[in-house]
Amino acid sequence: MNRHMWRWVVGTAAAVLLLAALLVRALGLAGVHRRTGYFSPVFAADGRSIYAIRRVVTATVIGPGQSFFTPPARVWIHRDRFSLVALRLPDGQVSVLDELPHSPLEGASLTEYHGAIFGTPHAHLRRTGSRIEYEVAVTRSEIPFSRTLVLEGGYEPDAGRAAHASGWTERHPAMTGDEPAQLHGDLEVIAVPGDELMPCAIAVLRTGEPGPRSLIQTGTCARKFPGGLGADVVTPLSRRGDIERAELVRRTYADLVERGRQSGLSEGQAMLAANKEMSRLGLYPRTTTLAAAAADCASASPLFRIAREEFAAGLFQDIAQAIASPGEQVDKSIGAYVTHRDYATSQEINAFLERGNTVFHVRTGDGCWRLTIDRPR
């Protein structure tokens, strides 16, 4: 082969390899990815800044990794770092408060699908007073089981001091759910979902204003929401209603328990009384109740007779409680009444109630009573 032919072969091969590489990249079959996500934002105690957990991950991804359609992609995590950051509310300026030890996924080779191509992250912030507590976790899919490793720590704003556990431990995350600190007055801070389980923006929503304000966002958000982070994107993510209701329930229950203790009730009695009042207020699910009223049973039908020995044997405790406090709503026993080998009363009342009846009469040693069941709708 002469020199010109050799050059042509080499040039053609190089062009083919270049075109193949460009095609693979264009189809998303291989490439180096760098993503940033902002998790679990909460307001500082003074409302002038926002805390969040930031994740920055760099990885090489080879293969399509489309769930249900293709084999998983092969992923090499080159760098995976979490940090606790603060964002100033006026201008979104970011300050790093604590660089966490590198993730257990750093340097790992994974087999994953898109949607969680960099493993599954979890991050949660909780503010108590001014102190910030955090929990960060990563999960990698392994056969036959997945593994989750967790790191926890805290930050004292007044001292400017952060402290985290000695290392990542294998367990399940414990911190989840909404946090009251997601709200500050009429403001709400929201993490906007991005791709690969990486929130791509932090937005602030003010009650009564038509649109949110984007405090910080990544390129992923710009691509995913080309029309911007308007009310149509952010408002459906609001958790204000659920957070405010949860706080109302928490405060009301605590106040009722404290009121019961101050009235002379024991801790257990105060909690039981608070539970009933919470149900009456509609803050807890309503329970089925039973109330007794003295009645003339001469014409009552059917009429069930409950012997003193049945009460003494522990049967019909809710009926006994209702009779002892006429007119008061008491909790109805859950399910059917317990049967006894020496008495048929339980079976008779159970059969009557199973037909949907809610009013019945009983005769006891103390007289005759009309019992009314109130079931929640």
Image (tube, rainbow, N blue to C red):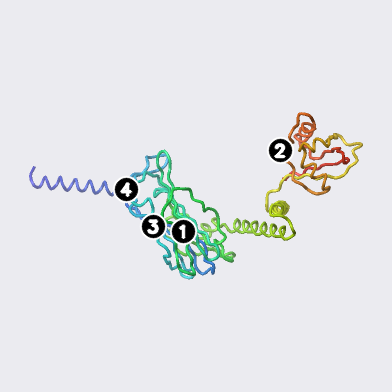
Which residue lies at the image location 32% right of the left edge and 48% below the top edge?
Answer: 30
* Residue sitting farthest toward the left: 2
- Distance in Å between CA atoms under marks 3 and 1: 11 Å
Most foreground residue, 208 or 334: 334
Q: Can you give x and y, in whole percent of width and height, for residue 18 in the image?
A: 24, 49
Most foreground residue, 244 or 337: 337
Q: Can you give x and y, in whole percent of width and height, for residue 279 in the image?
A: 71, 51
Amino acid on which the number 1 mark rests in the picture: Gly
Q: Residue 328: give its label.
A: none
Mark earlier in primary sequence (2, 4)? 4
- Distance in Å between CA atoms under marks 2 and 4: 60 Å
Residue ID for mark 1: 153
Which residue lies at the image location 41% right of the left edge and 38% below the top edge?
Answer: 144
Question: Is disc 2 surrounded by few (<14), some (14 to 19) or many (20+) residues within 10 Å?
Answer: few
Q: In this orientation, does residue 27 appear?
A: no
Most foreground residue, 168 or 182: 168
Residue ID for mark 4: 30
- On screen, 266 above or below 321? below
Q: Quadrant of the N terminus?
A: top left
Q: Nearer the viewer, mark 3 or mark 4?
A: 3
Which residue lies at the image location 60% right of the left edge and 55% below the top edge?
Answer: 242
Q: Can you give x and y, in whole percent of width and height, for residue 262 in the image?
A: 72, 61
Residue ID for mark 2: 335
- Dot 4: what SS? strand
- On screen, 45 above or below 73? below
- Distance in Å between CA atoms under marks 3 and 2: 53 Å
Residue ID for mark 3: 101
Left or right of 74? Residue 296 is: right
